[in-house]
Image: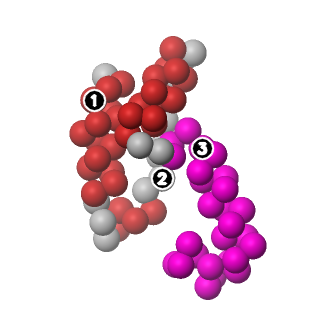
Amino acid sequence: MARLEPHVGSARAAKIRADYEASPGFGTPEQVAERLAERQEHGLGYAIHYFPEMAYDRSGVELFERTVMRELS
């Protein structure tokens, strides 16, 4: 939020945050894996995920690889 607010304002940043938190890709790795597995059962073959911090911090995508992807394979 601190990085986003100066660029879009606090009201828009709050909306972006709410949308992000409501997405299936938000939560603990276990929660994300569970939501994606449910979609996989309904035909999901691939998903595109956004890791905005990846340019300077790979920990999120590495956690996703170690936990979520392993659960879905």
State the mark number for residue 23: 3
Coloration mode: secondary structure
Measured Cα–Cα span from mark 1 to mark 3? 20 Å
Q: Which residue is mark 1?
A: 70
Say which residue label 2 marks.
Answer: 50
**Nearer the viewer's eye, disc 2 or disc 3?**
3
Residue 59: give its label.
none
- Which residue is located at x 75 percent, y 73 percent? 11
Asked if residue 62 is positioned above or below residue 58 in the image, the reply reads above
Query: Amino acid type of disc 1?
Result: Arg
Q: Does residue 4 show up magenta in the picture? A: yes
Drawn side of residue 40 relative to residue 62, left or right: right
Q: Which residues are magenta?
A: 1-26
Q: Is residue 67 visible?
A: yes
Report x, y in % for residue 1. Answer: 56, 72
Secondary structure of the residue carrying tag 2 is loop
Tell me if mark 3 has few (under 14), some (14-19) or many (20+) residues whose alpha carbon lies within 10 angstroms of its own: few
Q: Amino acid at mark 3?
A: Ser
